[in-house]
Image (spheres, rainbow, N blue to C red):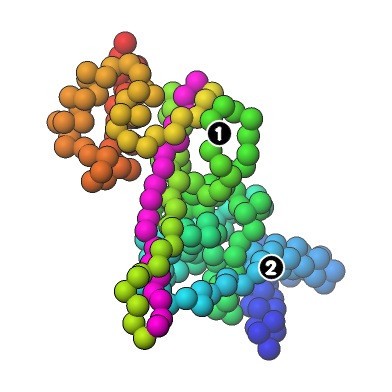
């Protein structure tokens, strides 16, 4: 029954797509059928992954990016852009999840993801590369892409066990951490604090320290904002040399 629901959805969607593309009544039945199969197969590929596995543990919080609910997002999958799909990002398993028309949570195949956009962030899947210092494979947020620098953020949720046992049942919770990777002159550098950021940027340290103080930027308080603003400022200083 559930497979039938998906099939009916694809059939209706396919015919809507075809009607929008060409309303001419002169197209042959064979042409309509062939075009419909193309549309249906493309959209069916989105929902061909495995269903998301649920935790058997009792969780205190959730492992998803920003919110555990699905949100409207934009997805490029196998070279095809879907402008309005329901997505969420599991930061513990590092999986992008899509909600199917039958309300199944389906894990997208990483090798087919070109990019995804949710909450205003651009997420891409990074494959292993021979560049020096290249980050581990996985989903990353593209924070900045400028003339001198390419900045990525890696978010990870780590699971811990709450030792306050009640009725012999353990509870588990997630702690979010982030790492930044800055590409400079063909090499990636891992940024883990303010010191490593300034060391990687290397020049204009005095100006950057003054900029950080004037903007009240703090790695501990808001690492993403501090790293992003400082990198953009350094690129601006380089242009005025």
Which residue, as the protein is rendered here, is positioned at the far right? 30
Specify whether residue 215 is in view: yes
State yes or no: residue 13 in magenta: no
Image quarter (top left, top right, bottom left or bottom right) of the N terminus: bottom right
CA distance separating discs 1 and 2: 31 Å
The image shows a total of numbered marks equal to: 2
Specify whether residue 18 is in view: no
Q: Position of residue 11 (x, y in %)?
A: 69, 76
Front residue of 121 and 62 = 62
Q: Who comes first in sequence, dot 1 or dot 2?
A: 2
Front residue of 7 and 90 = 90
- Local packing at callout 1 (Cα closer than 10 Å; few below 14, some 14-19, many 20+) is some
Instruction: Tell which tag, 1 or 2, sits nearer the viewer.
Output: 1
State yes or no: residue 182 in magenta: yes
User: Which residue is under mark 2?
Assistant: 48
Residue drawn at 65 percent across, 69 percent down: 50
Q: Position of residue 14 (x, y in %)?
A: 67, 70
Q: Is residue 31 above or below residue 171?
A: above
Figure quadrant of residue 195: top left
**Regarding mark 2 in the picture, which secondary structure is present there?**
loop
Q: Position of residue 174 (x, y in %)?
A: 39, 63
Figure quadrant of residue 104: bottom right
Q: Is residue 131 left or right of residue 162?
A: right
Residue drawn at 57 percent across, 27 percent down: 132
Residue drawn at 38 percent across, 50 percent down: 177
- Predominant secondary structure, magenta span: strand
Region rendered in magenta = 168-185
Q: Position of residue 46 (x, y in %)?
A: 64, 64
Q: Is residue 8 left or right of residue 234?
A: right
Which residue, as the protein is rendered here, is positioned at the far top? 241
User: Which residue is under mark 1?
Assistant: 134
């Amino acid at each position: 029954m559930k497979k039938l629901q998906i099939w009916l959805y694809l059939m209706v969607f396919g015919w809507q797509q075809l009607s929008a593309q060409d309303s001419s009544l002169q197209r042959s039945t064979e042409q309509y059928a062939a075009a419909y199969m193309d549309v249906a197969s493309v959209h069916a590929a989105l929902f061909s992954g495995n269903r998301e596995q649920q935790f058997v543990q009792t969780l205190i919080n959730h492992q998803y990016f920003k919110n555990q609910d699905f949100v409207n997002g934009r997805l490029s999958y196998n070279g095809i852009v879907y402008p309005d799909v329901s997505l969420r990002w599991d930061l513990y398993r590092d999986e992008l999840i899509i909600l199917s028309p039958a309300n199944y949570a389906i894990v997208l195949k990483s090798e087919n993801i070109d990019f995804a956009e949710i909450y205003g962030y651009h997420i891409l899947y990074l494959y292993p590369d021979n560049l020096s210092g290249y980050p581990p494979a996985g989903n990353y947020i593209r924070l900045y892409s400028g003339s001198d620098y390419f900045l990525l953020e890696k978010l990870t949720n780590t699971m811990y066990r709450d030792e306050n046992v009640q009725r012999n049942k353990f509870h588990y919770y997630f702690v979010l951490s982030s790492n930044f990777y800055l590409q400079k002159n063909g090499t990636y550098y891992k940024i883990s604090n303010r010191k490593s950021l300034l060391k990687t940027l290397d020049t204009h340290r005095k100006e950057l320290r003054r900029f950080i103080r004037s903007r009240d930027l703090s790695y501990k308080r808001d690492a993403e904002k501090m790293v992003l603003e400082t990198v953009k400022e350094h690129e601006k200083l380089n242009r005025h040399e």
